[in-house]
């Protein structure tokens, strides 16, 4: 958790509540701060980042974990691209546990994990496809993603599973863009594992023009 002064929501240049199960995206300019607020607690937020100038440069979970030497995302983490550049960094975090290993849910993975009857439930992959189309991108542009507020402990043998989230209502994470990025969110609709407490809820996004001093 950062001890830097919290930016005043009244100074935000943008504020929006993303409904449960829905996608969202925005072009973040270098130096802008994005805050994601878990309004009710235990809500996973899947995210992807793309370089606005050249979307073929995008978030790389592998490079981010390698550079950090950690499988988890938290305060101070640099979000690294597939070209080895820092796209953004985590400047504040009141939750303390974020994942970048478990990927996003899809209709296909739901069917495999939870039974054929779940195949037609809405999923994050479909949210990403819908939102990426607004930026001229498609399903082939979906890569391994971030999962803010999602609790995915990894045991010494490398096995991991999604367990109950530790995020409480009002927890937030601040991400400061270090280049112009397209930031894409799926407010996760998963109801078959505990990543959303089996009850998807809204989240709030706010944008400030510059980080707090």
Image: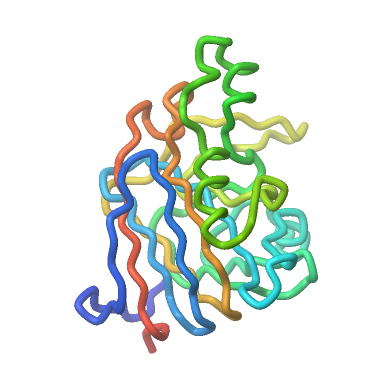
Q: Locate residue 117 relative to residue 179 in the image: left or right.
A: left
Residue plotted at (58% across, 10% down) = 116
Q: Give the image quarter of residue 86.
A: bottom right
Q: Locate residue 165 relative to residue 63 in the image: left or right.
A: left
Instruction: List the single residue furthest toward the bottom.
Output: 213
Q: Locate residue 74 relative to residue 154 in the image: left or right.
A: left
Q: Give the image location of residue 68, x and y in percent.
A: 70, 63
Q: Give the image quarter of residue 7.
A: bottom left
Query: Is the C terminus in the top left, top right, bottom left or bottom right quadrant?
Result: bottom left
Q: Give the image location of residue 19, x and y in percent.
A: 30, 46
Taking depth in this image into account, of 164 and 21 the one nearest to the observer is 21
Instruction: List the single residue furthest toward the left.
Output: 10
Query: Is the N terminus in the top left, top right, bottom left or bottom right quadrant?
Result: bottom left
Q: Is residue 118 above or below residue 17?
A: above
Q: Give the image location of residue 136, x and y in percent.
A: 61, 60
Residue plotted at (43% across, 68% down) = 174
Residue plotted at (57% across, 22% down) = 110
Q: Is residue 166 above or below residue 194?
A: below
Residue plotted at (38% across, 66% down) = 35
Q: Give the image quarter of residue 190.
A: top left
């Amino acid at each position: 958790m950062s001890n830097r002064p919290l930016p005043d929501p009244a100074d935000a240049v943008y504020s929006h509540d993303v409904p449960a199960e829905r996608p969202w995206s925005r072009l973040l300019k270098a130096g802008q701060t994005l805050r994601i607020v878990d309004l009710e607690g235990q809500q996973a937020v899947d995210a992807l980042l793309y370089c606005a100038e050249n979307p073929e440069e995008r978030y790389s979970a592998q490079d981010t974990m390698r550079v950090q030497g950690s499988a988890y995302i938290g305060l101070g983490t640099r979000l690294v691209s597939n070209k080895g550049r820092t796209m953004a960094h985590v400047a504040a975090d009141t939750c303390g546990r974020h994942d970048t290993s478990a990927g996003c849910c899809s209709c296909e993975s739901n069917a495999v994990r939870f039974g054929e009857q779940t195949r037609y439930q809405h999923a994050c992959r479909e949210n990403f496809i819908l939102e990426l189309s607004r930026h001229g991108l498609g399903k082939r542009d979906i890569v391994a993603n971030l999962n803010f507020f999602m609790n995915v402990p990894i045991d010494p043998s490398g096995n991991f599973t999604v367990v109950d989230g530790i995020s409480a209502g009002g927890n937030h994470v601040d991400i400061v863009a270090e280049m112009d990025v397209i930031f894409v969110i799926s407010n996760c609709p998963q109801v078959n594992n505990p990543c959303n407490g089996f009850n998807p809820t809204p989240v709030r996004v706010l944008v400030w023009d510059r980080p707090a001093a």
